[in-house]
Image (cartoon, helix red, strand yellow):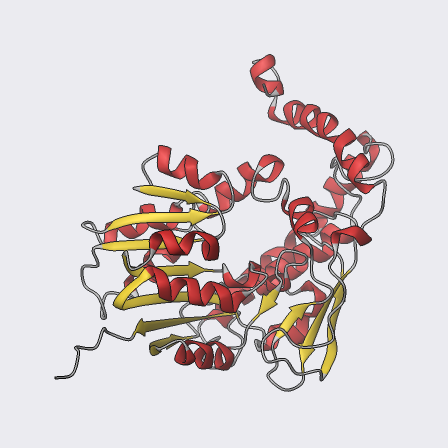
Amino acid sequence: MTATEADPTATAAEARTARIAALRPSYRADLAEGTDRFFEPRRTDCPWCGSTRLRIRLRTRDLLQHKPGRFVLDQCLDCTHVFQNPQLSELGLEFYYRDFYDGLGEQRLAGVFGTRAGTYRNRARSVVRFASAPGSWLDVGTGHGHFCDTAREVFPDTSFDGLDLSEGVKLAEQHGRLVRGFRGSFPELAPTLSGQYDVVSMFHYLEHSRDPQRELAAARDALRPGGLLLIEVPDPQCRYARLLGRWWLPWLQPQHLNLVPAANLRARLGALGFTVVLEQHGEPHDPVDLLAACWLLFDAVAPAEDAPWRQGAPPGRLRRTVRGALLLAAAPALLLATLLDRVIARVAGRTRLSNAYRLLARRAPEQSPTR
């Protein structure tokens, strides 16, 4: 029972404070042994191509939730793949994802994802030229199913299923956004979904995977011969990645484990028997780079908000007042950043400032037996 359910007169702020207090003991117990146990051993080779020629691309902290820990992104000097090293273990993934998409973070992120209908329609329409009426569609990493709910406007006769690790996928099924919601690991569930789908989509999903190449093989298995695989991921070769450094939002540490350059993804899809039929850079760009960088910077220097994983006493009224005043003072900079993002978005695809790319690939059709 939540604090609001126990006391209907409680405000949202009071309910959140009570929830944080209830979660604090379990977080303190998790952190009592430090954060080293949340990581796998550091690897000496690239997980994409196997090269041992690596360099450190970025050192950073958790700039969104501010959970304790230090994170390193390495880059392969041969294939340019960028990956977290050392990578989070299963235990670490559970700790750092907890209260991000679900729990304390659910309402905030559900509000963000629920207001991106234009983005979702743009993604769905990228398929129209290649499949005007797909019968079945699986959205991997679907979260609460908002994409499928909107894509139904473009493909009203398509049956949309979703797959995710979080409980949100079952909620999406209950709310009618999905026909079927599968909770679990895609590579582990793929054998039960073999050959069932005309389209499989992965929107900002592969970068969260510990083994992206295994996810691609699972997508091939779930598709019917001639089916389409639609992928959208952050572009680690975006110029903003270097210009903004740790303040570039798509680095998103510690959640993003692998950032795959487009050339690598194209080559791997070809090796799996796919043909890339569409590549887009400008269209999937999300014009928030400067705004997000400014927000992350101001959030880092302002007094911290309360959270159950923070050490020390919860912030008092003075700290909350100072934080509010600093963020209010930052409003002009945030507004300017928003305007610049919108202007730059018009040329992002042509100037390598696009923060994402999209590939659409067709699985090889089943060949008729030769006589």
Q: Is residue 316 left or right of residue 112?
A: right
Residue at point 72%, 40% (across, down): 324
Res. 116 in view: yes
Residue sitting at the far right:
312
> Left or right: where does residue 126 sit relative to residue 49?
left
The answer to which quarter of the image holds residue 103 is top right
In the rendered image, the vertical position of residue 108 relative to residue 83, given as above or below:
above
The residue located at (87%, 36%) in the rendering is 312
Tell me where residue 34 appears, x and y as whole percent.
84, 47
Spot occupied by residue 160 in the image (x, y as percentages of width and height): 29, 49
Is residue 142 placed above or below 3 in the rendered structure? below
Question: Horizontal placement of 278 versus 45: left or right?
Answer: left
Q: Horizontally, is 351 left or right of 219 in the view?
A: right
Count every numbered label the image shows and give the total. Answer: 0
Q: Which x, y percent locates residue 202?
A: 42, 60
Can you say which quadrant of the picture contains the C terminus? Answer: bottom left
Query: Up-down: is 141 above or below 313?
Result: below
Res. 218 image quadrant: bottom left
Asked if residue 178 can be seen in this view, the reply is no
Q: Who is closer to the viewer here, 299 or 69?
A: 69
Q: Give the percent coordinates (x, y) of residue 341.
A: 53, 65
Give whichever of 162, 324 is nearer the camera.
162
Give the farthest residue toward the bottom.
78
**As displayed, is residue 192 above or below residue 316?**
below
Considering the image in quadrants, where does the N terminus appear?
top right
Q: Which residue is drawn at 28% across and 63% down?
A: 125
